[in-house]
Image (spheres, coloured by chain):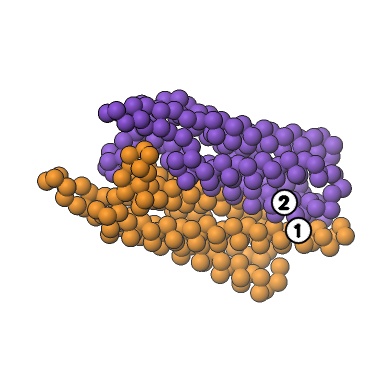
Chain colours: A orange, B purple
């Protein structure tokens, strides 16, 4: 692996770490409340199992990114394991952001056929936080997909050279 | 690649094709209706954008599986492209099944905090179809993840042998 490529990979992993930390921080601080017919209606991320799954997935991906940054070395004997774990973490990130975006879409637009009303009009601060968190989570998933494709390109290239 | 391994891969791709076709067929035939206060309430998959995304993703994965089965050859020069496309199709399948499962969960359990009521009590036939379709879609995603890990194992092994 060339030096430039190593720096690029480390930069991507740092960006992924930053994105997951941002996603968690913005999501867990999201709360807003509104009063409807004398009843206080409070919105927070832990009211929805999908948002909890999202936070757990981002925490796993963030912890893994940190671990790999510390263990990372051009000569690391763990690089095969890291590629396999990258696949698993990418799958986890894509799954959690997709599920969270689906629920956020119902929260924003509702679904008139199912009788589910949008809630963003009542709790705009909550919705803004969730939107910010999902943008960071989306960035983390894209960065991991890039890391994975970059690893694949790196391991496919020597094979190309050896088996022309 | 050994002959046994080739047969295993072809079998997995056939299974993935079957799973995507089953997911699409069961999802598009899902409909049910109920009468609430003299209003007919009709449930079908196209009422939800996430279920439409699910059907499109399964169709792309199914079409791709069919194409690869026809183009597949042990000596195929396209195998590097196929691995990259496998990553993309796996990502698409994981994303669509996760989003669809999130919406199906709201349909089944509702979310009392957001005031979204479960609809499965009113349209049980619709919910049964969606559940069946999601099981097939989940199987397709798992099969593609296995295919991807199997491809990685295959391309990592010669490198292990060549660079001990």
Q: Secondary structure at mark 1?
A: helix
Kindly give the residue lying farthest to the bottom in the view shown. A4
Q: Nearer the viewer, mark 1 or mark 2?
A: 2
The residue at the point 84 percent across, 53 percent down is B77
Q: Residue at x 63, y 57 (%)?
A: A148
Q: Is residue B60 above or below residue A27?
A: above
Left or right relative to B53: residue B8:
right
Q: Which mark is residue A156?
A: 1
Q: Nearer the viewer, residue B97 or A110?
A: A110
Q: Are marks 1 and 2 on the same chain?
A: no
| Residue A115 locus on image (x, y percent) | 33, 39
> How far apart are the two marked residues, 1 and 2, measured between alpha carbons?
10 Å
Q: Judge whether residue B136 can be spotted in this image.
A: no
Q: Position of residue B103 (x, y in %)?
A: 43, 40
Q: What x and y, as percent, mark residue B79? A: 79, 51
What chain letter is assigned to the residue under label 1? Answer: A
Which chain is mark 2 on?
B
Q: Which residue is mark 2?
A: B83
The reply to whether residue B63 is visible in this rendering is yes
Say left or right for A148 vs B81. left
Q: Quarter of the image holding residue A131?
A: bottom left
Disc 2 crowd, CA 10 A, few/some/many (<14, 14-19, 20+): some
Which quarter of the rendered picture does the N terminus of chain A lie within? Answer: bottom right
Lateral position of residue B84 relative to residue B121, left or right = right
Residue B49's x, y, as percent? 47, 46
Q: Quadrant of the C terminus of chain A?
A: bottom right
Decide: marks 1, 2 in contact (CB < 8 A)? yes
Mark 1 crowdedness (10 Å alpha carbons): few <14, some 14-19, many ≥20: some
Look at the numbered disc 2 and give the secondary structure of its residue. Answer: helix
Closer to the camera, B76 or B115?
Answer: B115
Determine the residue positioned at 52% across, 57% down. Answer: A141
Q: Residue at x 59, y 48 (%)?
A: B92
């Amino acid at each position: 692996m060339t030096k430039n490529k190593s720096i690029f990979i480390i930069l991507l992993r740092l960006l992924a770490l930053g994105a997951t930390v941002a996603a968690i921080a913005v999501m867990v601080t999201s709360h807003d409340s509104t009063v409807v017919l004398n009843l206080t209606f409070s919105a927070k991320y832990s009211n929805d199992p999908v948002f909890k799954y999202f936070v757990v997935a981002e925490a796993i991906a963030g912890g893994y990114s940190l671990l790999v940054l510390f263990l990372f070395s051009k000569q690391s004997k763990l690089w095969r394991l890291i590629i396999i774990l990258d696949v698993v973490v990418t799958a986890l990130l894509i799954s959690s952001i997709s599920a969270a975006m689906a629920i956020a879409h119902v929260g924003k637009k509702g679904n008139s056929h199912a009788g589910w009303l949008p809630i963003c009009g009542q709790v705009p601060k909550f919705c803004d936080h969730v939107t910010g968190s999902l943008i960071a989570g989306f960035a983390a998933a894209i960065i991991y997909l890039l890391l994975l494709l970059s690893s694949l390109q790196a391991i496919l290239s020597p094979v190309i050279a050896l088996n022309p």
